[in-house]
Amino acid sequence: MLVSLQLGSLIAPAYACGCGAMLPRDESRVSVDRETSVVAWDGRTEQIVMRLTVRGDAPEAAWIMPVPHRASVELGDADLFSELSSLTAPRREVRHYFWPRSDDWPLAPTTGDGAGAPSAAAPPVSVVGRERLGPFDVARLAATDPEALRNWLEDNGFELPDRLATALEPYVEQKWEYVAVRLAPREKGKPLVGSLEPLRLRFASDRLVYPMRLSKLASTPQELGLYVLAAHRMEPRGPIGGDAPEVTYAGRIEPASEYRGADALAAMTGGKPVFLTAIEQSFPHPERIDGDHELRAAEADTPYRTVVYTDRLLTVADIPVWVLTLLGVVLAAVVATVLRVRRSRGRRPVTVPPPPV
């Protein structure tokens, strides 16, 4: 099972956002400040629970998500994200140092602040389902032609940019389908801002894949976090054009009731113990992204957890140990000097007075 977290920023005309693409309407602007995705895979079926936090002046926008097979869509459970954050939090430790640093006295400055694919006879675009889920108008599409997908979007009030149409071509060639979601604020006429309710997608998949290809259209660096729940420690098959993926957590866990959202995680894992791997990756040059992420089992289930250190000056009763050490050295020197003086006085020769005449 794959649990993925992606953070990114999107302002028109940068259309990519995580594993999908966001389209504002007309000349309006929309920004995806945070995209959190939870993906579970059991070898046959993949689930993605996604929550977007958006801002901008757009009264509505469209979000397009490519999927390898026909998907069902429903509202997700927001508590799932709280539990994942708790499970993967780094361990915090205090690390002491002896000599003062630039922020310590006397060195501190004294001033300043510190479903199956469509057949050949199918229409270029067919709407295989449409639902109203909370604030979302969800359409599930099957498209065999990027141009037909463009026409459908335009008929529904959205413009498909040329770059995005080109980026969608590999998915069309592989006969993937799409989930198109119209995002709108709860209050009509208000801009699209804040955290939206999570959506849950479910579709057939015989491999563990997280679509990333559309992120190559982003004009700003992208940050990706993956939380992988599986029988073993997992790793990406390759960097797909980004920096080397970094493991920030690896260990076997068992969903427990003391965690907020434990029921939501148990629903994703079947309540069974799993191995959790947290992976982070940066894409400083999104245009170099050359595919979708695929994950595989690592050679060994080596545990790991990120440790965040807080450095503190070593003190005793709020007095720096280095000060006490220097005072001790000075005191020892004084005592040694006094002892030497006393010894030298005790060794002076005694002058014998001359005998009387």
Image: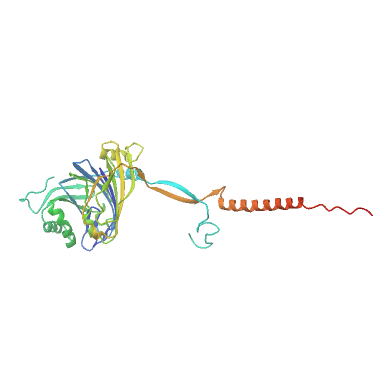
Q: Would residue 272 be found to the left or right of residue 334 on screen? A: left
Q: Does residue 15 show up?
A: no
The structure residue drawn at horizontal position 65% and vertical position 53%, both measured from the top left corner, is: 333
Q: In this view, does 289 lie above or below 117?
A: below
In-front residue for pair 137/7 = 7
In-front residue for pair 234/65 = 234
Q: Would residue 349 be found to the left or right of residue 321 on screen? A: right
Find residue 108 and report its horizontal and vertical position in percent: 52, 59
Find residue 145 and report its horizontal and vertical position in percent: 11, 56
Q: Would residue 188 be found to the left or right of residue 342 on screen? A: left
The structure residue drawn at horizontal position 82% and vertical position 52%, both measured from the top left corner, is: 350
Find residue 236 and report its horizontal and vertical position in percent: 26, 49
Q: Would residue 76 be found to the left or right of residue 99 on screen? A: left
The structure residue drawn at horizontal position 21% and vertical position 48%, both measured from the top left corner, is: 209
The quadrant in which the N terminus is found is: top left
Give the residue furthest to the right.
Answer: 357
